[in-house]
Image: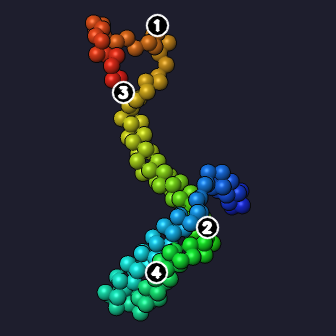
């Protein structure tokens, strides 16, 4: 079993090796406007359902939108934290989704094929066979056969 600190080091090295997060004024402005707009939408939904946190979300959204236009550099630490969380979430979720896909789709297909004694790759060894080459039927070559192969 892999220990937890080794997993964290592996995740950290993979994330740092593939990351190029832009943090210029334009990107910070986009970040502030996007998160601010989402917070305003959440506030509007809470207002509709009469939740008591509606004003806090609305104020936070307005502060982010105003700071995105006036002082975009003030959003830099928030963007770094947000993108770090997004990278960790992406690292974990991609492995989780691929693991679920493997165990819930690929493994049952393999088990059913094994129960049906189906060999998709024809990997069986036949000592009486002269060659494992699969011959194809003879066909007159046409120029169209070489065009648009994929």
Residue closer to the observer: 102 or 44: 44
Q: Secondary structure at mark 3?
A: loop
Q: Which residue is mark 4?
A: 61
Q: Which residue is mark 1?
A: 130
Q: Which residue is mark 2?
A: 80
Q: Is residue 139 left or right of residue 3?
A: left
Badges 2 and 4: C-beta atoms under 8 Å apart? Answer: no
At 46% from the left and 7% from the top, the residue drawn is 130
User: As drawn, which residue projects farthest toward the front?
Assistant: 70
Nearer to us: label 4 or label 3: 4
Q: Estimate the x, y position of residue 61 in percent, counting from the top left.
A: 46, 81
Q: In terms of sequence position, does the residue under pointer 4 or pointer 3 come before the other? A: 4
Measure how far apart labels 4 and 3 are at the Cα level.
Answer: 49 Å
Nearer to us: label 1 or label 3: 3
Image quarter (top left, top right, bottom left or bottom right) of the C terminus: top left
Q: Which residue is mark 3?
A: 150
């Amino acid at each position: 079993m892999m220990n937890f600190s080794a997993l964290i080091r592996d995740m950290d090295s993979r994330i740092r090796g593939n990351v190029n997060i832009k943090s210029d004024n334009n990107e910070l402005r986009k970040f502030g406007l996007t998160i601010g707009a989402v917070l305003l939408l959440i506030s509007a939904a809470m207002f509709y359902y009469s939740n008591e946190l509606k004003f806090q979300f609305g104020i936070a959204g307005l502060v982010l939108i105003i700071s995105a236009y006036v002082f975009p550099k003030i959003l830099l630490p928030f963007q770094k934290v947000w993108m770090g969380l997004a990278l960790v979430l992406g690292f974990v979720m991609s492995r989780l989704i691929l693991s679920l896909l493997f165990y819930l789709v690929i493994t049952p297909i393999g088990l059913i094929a094994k129960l049906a004694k189906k060999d998709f790759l024809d990997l069986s060894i036949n000592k009486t066979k002269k060659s494992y080459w699969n011959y194809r039927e003879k066909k007159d070559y046409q120029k169209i056969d070489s065009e648009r192969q994929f």
